Amino acid sequence: MKVDEQVLESLNRKKAYFLEYEEETKKLHSNGEDAVERVQEAMAARQRLIELIDEVDAQIRKQCGDTKEGRLLLEACKNRCEYKELLPGYQAVYNAGQQIFQIMTRIQNEEKLASVNMRNIIERLQEQIRQNRQASKVSGYLKNMNYSSDAKKGFLYNDKR
């Protein structure tokens, strides 16, 4: 197998990881009662995928080697060269790299939306905490007043009034 074919195979694996990463990023838009748990799971999955992508990047650098052709192939992976000056095998690598960058752009857009969603979740949770504090203050007050379920309505008023 030629080096450009090996790199192309690695890029296809990297693309698959990025597509999975994109799906996990979409899960960051979760709402509902278990939103925090789903966001945490998606963040953990994304971290695992980042590690796999880093491994593929290291493998690609190793496959390219430290030759003039290898550096050109690595530049083709990153779309940092002129497409029309590349050999057909290198053009396929360039195209695969371009597909990955398209996915990365979509992920960046999804992350912006996910950030807004996470802020909304935080605000909702903070509001629930505030409400719980108020409820606990009231229940603490009533407990201190020896309020029980059999107390008369309006027990806080002075009977002499």
Image (cartoon, grey):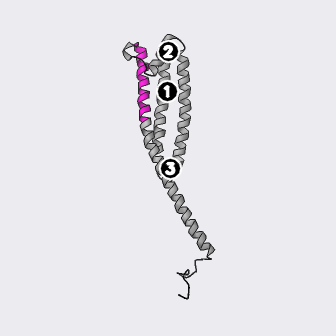
Name which of mark 1 and mark 2 comes first in the sequence: 1
- The residue carrying mark 1 is 13
Q: CA distance from mark 1 to mark 3?
A: 30 Å
Q: Secondary structure at mark 1?
A: helix
Q: Residues within 10 Å of mark 3 (few under 14, many from 20)?
A: some
Of circles 1 and 3, the one toward us is 3
Query: In the image, is residue 111 above or below residue 72?
Result: below
Q: Residue at x 55, y 22 (%)?
A: 59
Of circles 3 and 2, the one toward us is 2
- The residue carrying mark 2 is 71
Identify which amino acid the numbered label 3 is placed on.
Ala
**Residue 42, position in %: x, y?**
52, 42
The stretch in magenta equals 87-107
Q: CA distance from mark 3 to mark 2?
A: 45 Å
Splitting the image into 4 quarters, where does residue 136 fall?
bottom right
- The residue carrying mark 3 is 35
Identify which amino acid the numbered label 2 is placed on.
Arg
Please indicate, yes or no, whether residue 158 appears anywhere in the rendered image: yes
Q: CA distance from mark 1 to mark 2?
A: 20 Å
Name which of mark 3 and mark 2 comes first in the sequence: 3
**Residue 83, position in %: x, y?**
38, 17
Q: Secondary structure at mark 3?
A: helix
Please indicate, yes or no, whether residue 2 appears anywhere in the rendered image: no
